[in-house]
Image: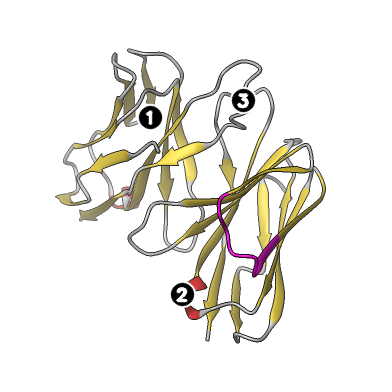
Amino acid sequence: ETGVTQTPRHLVMGMTNKKSLKCEQHLGHNAMYWYKQSAKKPLELMFVYSLEERVENNSVPSRFSPECPNSSHLFLHLHTLQPEDSALYLCASRGTGGLGEQFFGPGTRLTVL
Amino acid sequence: GQQLNQSPQSMFIQEGEDVSMNCTSSSIFNTWLWYKQEPGEGPVLLIALYKAGELTSNGRLTAQFGITRKDSFLNISASIPSDVGIYFCAGSWSKAGGTSYGKLTFGQGTILTVHP
């Protein structure tokens, strides 16, 4: 497996469910990002982890809870979501030597009923 | 905060035509990136630009980092049906020893449709 992978690719959940999104990068990078992509809006940065430490949280509601157990894995735990949270959730990674390039996974298409 | 204006929002062209799209920013960047996203997939990096005035090609794609550091453009020559997708520009401002963590500001995207 190469690059950045995300599972599941599609997820349908009710508002009372708890689920988790997983991201894994095989690039040896040490910064990882969660983005939300909604229709007709620019990508919205949600969280940034650098060296497994959360360094940015862009006013994301607490029903989204990230976790970075090591530099290769990133999770987004979901709880009590709203229908407006339906979107494509993208994970990205970047190496310290990079000048800004982020490499994205294929995303998880989330639908909240 | 920083904002990127990307235009046009959408383009409908015939196969073989050339395409041009651009991004302008309210503030300067020291890195400009161009990504392409196909349906059901994440954005894929096409071209990265690191210096004002830089012109870089990747096959039929050419991108330039504007001399003012506030704009960039992407050209696609002789378009083909597989060029269909959404093209995003992104800018980054990173300082050596800084704590920007390589944050990117994205444009709204240009939706490209190519008719055979």
Residue to which mark 3 is pinned: A98
Whether residue A106 is visible here, answered yes or no, is no
Residue to which mark 2 is pinned: A84
Q: Nearer the viewer, residue B106 or B50?
A: B106
Residue A59 % position (x, y) = 56, 55
How dense is the environment of label 3, judged by Cα within 10 Å: few (below 14), some, or many (20 and up)?
Answer: few
Secondary structure beneath label 1: loop
Q: In the image, is residue B57 part of the stretch drawn in magenta? A: no
Q: Kindly identify the amino acid type of the residue bearing the numbered disc 2.
A: Glu
Q: Which residue occupies the extreme right position in the image?
A: A69
Range drawn in magenta: A58-65
Chain of residue at mark 1? B
Say yes or no: labels 2 and 3 on the same chain: yes
How many angstroms separate mark 2 from mark 1 (CA)?
Answer: 40 Å
Mark in front: 2 vs 3: 2
For marks 2 and 3 on the same chain, the one whose residue lies earlier in the sequence:
2
Chain of residue at mark 2? A
Chain of residue at mark 3? A
Say yes or no: labels 2 and 1 on the same chain: no
Q: Marks 3 and 2: in contact by CB < 8 Å? A: no
Residue A74 % position (x, y) = 74, 53
Mark in front: 2 vs 1: 2
Secondary structure beneath label 3: loop
The answer to which quarter of the image holds residue A15 is bottom right
Q: Nearer the viewer, residue A76 or B53?
A: A76
Residue A77 % position (x, y) = 71, 67
- Lateral position of residue B49 relative to residue A92, left or right: left
Residue to which mark 1 is pinned: B59
Q: Kindly identify the amino acid type of the residue bearing the numbered disc 3.
A: Gly
Secondary structure beneath label 2: helix
